[in-house]
Image (cartoon, rainbow, N blue to C red):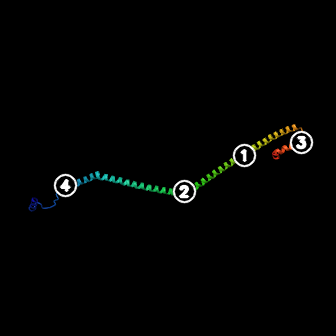
Amino acid sequence: MNTIQDMNFILMSGEMSRLFDLDLQLLHDSVLTLIAVFVLFLAGSFFFFNPARKFLEKRKQGIADDIQAAKDDKDEAARLKEEYEAKLSNVDAQVQEILADARKKALANENKIIGEAKEEATRIVERANHEAELEKQKVADEVKQEMITVATAMAGKIVDASIDEATQNRLIDETLKEMGESTWLS
C-alpha cells in the first residue's frame, strides 16, 4: 500500500510529466536489445534451425528415395506381371508341345519294342526250324540205323536160310512192310 501512496505523491508533485519518455538511454537499450535478439536469432539458427533444416532435408530426401523405390518396384512388378501373363498365355502351347513330344517318344519306343519283338520272334522261329532240322536229321539217322539193323538181320536170315531168290524177295517185302512205306520213302 505504501507504493500506491508513493505513486500518488509522484504524480501530484509533477515530476513525471510523461508516461513514456524517449530519451537517449531508452534508445540505447532498445538498440542493444535488438542486437541481442539478432545475435540470439543467429545463434538459434546455427544451433537449432540448421540442424532442424538438415534433419528435414534428410527426411525429405529419404521420402523422395522411398517414393522413387516404390515407383521402381511398381514398374518392376508391372513388368513381371506382363512377363508372367505372356508365359501363362504360352502355357497351353507349351503343354501341347510337351504332349506331342511325349507321344512321339512313346511311338518311337513302341516301334523299337515291336521291332525287337519281331527280331526275337524271327530268331525263335529260326532256332525252332534249326532244331526241327536237327530232329529230322536225327530221325533220319535213326531210320538209317534201323534199316542197317534190319538189313543185317535180313542178311543173317538169308544166309541162314540159303534160299532161292523168290524167298529173298518175299523177305525184303515183308521187312519193308514192317518198317512202313512212309519211313522208307522219306
Residue located 31% across and 51% down the image: 51
Residue located 82% across and 44% down the image: 178
Quarter that holds the C terminus: top right
Amino acid found under the numbered disc labelled 3? Thr
Q: Which of pointers 1 and 3 lies earlier in the amino acid sequence? A: 1
What residue does disc 4 label? Answer: 29
Q: Which of pointers 1 and 4 lies earlier in the amino acid sequence? A: 4
Where residue 142 appears, x then y in whole percent? 78, 41
What residue does disc 2 label? Answer: 91
Cα distance between the residues tagged 3 and 2: 99 Å
Q: For residue 167, which numbered disc appears in the image? A: 3
Q: For residue 128, which numbered disc appears in the image? A: 1
Where residue 108 appears, x then y in whole percent? 64, 51
Cα distance between the residues tagged 3 and 4: 183 Å
Q: Which of pointers 2 and 1 lies earlier in the amino acid sequence? A: 2
Left or right: 133 in relation to 165: left
Q: Secondary structure at mark 2?
A: helix
Amino acid found under the numbered disc labelled 2? Val
Left or right: 52 in relation to 66: left
Residue located 85% across and 44% down the image: 174
Of circles 3 and 2, the one toward us is 3
Of circles 3 and 4, the one toward us is 3
